Amino acid sequence: MSSEEDKPPAPPVRLTSNRGGGDRIDSAAPVDMKPLPKEPDDADRKKKTLKNKIKVSKASHNDSKPNISYPTNFEHTVHVGFDAITGEFTGMPEQWALMLKNSNISKQEQKKNPQAVLDVLNWFDNSSKQRPSSKYMTHGLHTTTHS
């Protein structure tokens, strides 16, 4: 059997318009006697299928790595706890531990009020990170004299 025998018969020649013109009076008049366009070859069909288009688009996206930026306005939150049994702070940053060691706060005072110690360390750490403000308050102090 040849491939010609496997093909369906040719489509009929179109004699009327496909548009629905129900309000037209002369709808019986024949439109151009054009035959329908030729059926595409099997090779052309395979090229144009949606499945193949999706495969091609996915392959082109996988070739390049996405460019992901670093986080902005990142802030690391410190969680410090106090163990009442041992009298030691847990999860304290090294900088805070060094400040506490160099301070004049005794172990008894630390046990008595650990939250106050943490508040002071937190305040001191935040104040050292801020840029120093002007020594004199000059903005907003404009003296004007009216005569």
Image: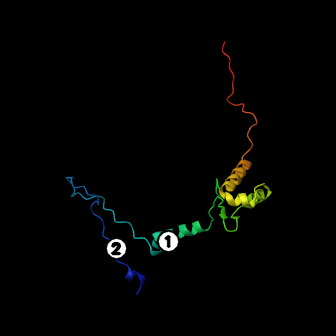
Query: Observer-nearest residue: 56 or 86?
Result: 86
Position of the C terminus, as image quadrant, is: top right
Tell me the amino acid under the disc marked 2. Ala
Question: Residue 86's image quarter?
Answer: bottom right
- The residue carrying mark 2 is 10
For image coordinates 31% across by 67% down, the residue present is: 13
105 vs 126, nearest the viewer? 105
Residue position marked by numbered label 1 in the rendering: 52
What SS does tag 1 mark?
helix
Few, some or many C-alpha atoms within 10 Å of disc 2 (few <14, some 14-19, many ≥20)? few
Residue 62 is situated, as x and y percent measured from the top left of the image, at 59, 68
Judged from this view, the residue extending furthest toward the right is: 102
Residue 9 showing in the rendered view: yes
| Foreground: disc 1 or disc 2 | 1
Instruction: Give the mark nearer the N terminus: 1 vs 2.
Output: 2
User: What is the residue that sits farthest to the left in this orientation?
Assistant: 25
Report whether 98 appears left or right of 113: right
Whether 23 is drawn above or below 86: the answer is above
- The foreground one among 134 and 82 is 82
Residue 28 in the figure: left or right of residue 10: left
Q: Position of residue 97 (x, y in %)?
A: 75, 60
Is there any visible trace of residue 49 in the rendered image?
no
- Residue 20 point in image, percent of width and height: 26, 57
Left or right placement of residue 145 versus residue 23 in this view: right
Q: Residue at x 38, y 79 (%)?
A: 7
* Residue closest to the eye, 61 or 23: 61
Q: Please report the residue visible at 50 percent of the width from the left and 71 percent of the height from the top.
A: 52
Q: CA distance from mark 1 to mark 2?
A: 27 Å
Quarter of the image where one finds residue 26 = bottom left
Kindly identify the amino acid type of the residue bearing the numbered disc 1. Answer: Asn
